[in-house]
Image (cartoon, grey):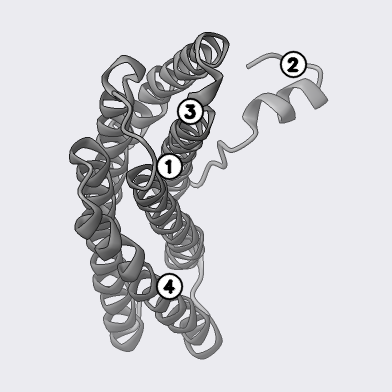
Amino acid sequence: MSVLLNKQIEKIKRMLLAEGALVEQALQRAVSAVEHGDTELAVQVVEQDAQIDLAEIDIEEECLATLALHQPVAHDLRFIVSVLKINSELERIGDLASNVASQCLALSELPPIDLDPFGLHEMAHQAQRMVKQSLDALVQVDESLADGVRKMDDLVDDRHREVYAIVERYVREDIDRMPQLIRIQNTARQIERIADHAVNIAKDVIYLARGEIVRHRRARAKAAGGSV
């Protein structure tokens, strides 16, 4: 690796980790806003989304410039490709954190409803742990951490189905609470999608570590007539 390319890759690493820190902070604030009904914190998350968007653009431009000027190969090329994909995933998590905060703001304008029975807190904290672990896996290029994120996703999916079932029951019991229930279901959906993006980051880490694309493995195996 040339000295200039090495410096460029280190710069991109720092930029990506800084973006990851912003996303983690936004998600933590969004979860806290929902837990405590903190509208000021929710507004901060919505406003912070623009900062994450700008970080995504800067990283993409830096990666494209590196590809054009240095023409990396082998592991260096794989790193740039991984960064481009992870960068997009982080931006989407930032968007979803902002959406969660927006649901919190919408709930604050409606008659209060007890959120405890829905288990949103536990679901949100699990998704938050997945994002953190996926970023830890990236920093350490650790396949075992990445695999752990993929396994954690089942818990979030199960919790999402439970929230949907509880919302259905509440609708039958009290149709007047429909506006609040819609917001709760929307919040659960955003959290479930955050977890999915954390899984995608974990898969990208595995690709970075060993050059194997694990996305859509089941579909590829089925098309090949094999099994996963």
Is the Cβ of the residue at disc 4 closer than 8 Å to that at disc 3?
Answer: no
Q: Amino acid at mark 3?
A: Leu
Residue at image mark 1: 194
Q: Residues within 10 Å of mark 1 (few under 14, many from 20)?
A: many
**Lower sequence index among marks 2 and 4:** 4
Nearer to the camera, 20 or 186: 186
Find residue 181 and name its label: 3
Distance in Å between CA atoms under marks 2 and 4: 41 Å
- SS for dot 4: helix
On the image, the x and y values in percent for residue 165 come to: 52, 12
- Is the residue 51 above or below the residue 104 in the image? below
Is the Cβ of the residue at disc 3 closer than 8 Å to that at disc 1?
Answer: no
**Lower sequence index among marks 3 and 2:** 3
**Lower sequence index among marks 1 and 4:** 4
Residue at image mark 2: 226
Q: Amino acid at mark 2?
A: Gly
Tell whether 93 sits left or right of 42.
right
In the rendered image, the quadrant that contains the N terminus is bottom left
**Lower sequence index among marks 2 and 1:** 1
Q: Residues within 10 Å of mark 3 (few under 14, many from 20)?
A: many
Tell whether 21 sits left or right of 130.
left
Tell whether 199 sits left or right of 42.
right
Find residue 53 and name its label: 4
- Residue 59, by quadrant, is bottom left
- SS for dot 2: loop
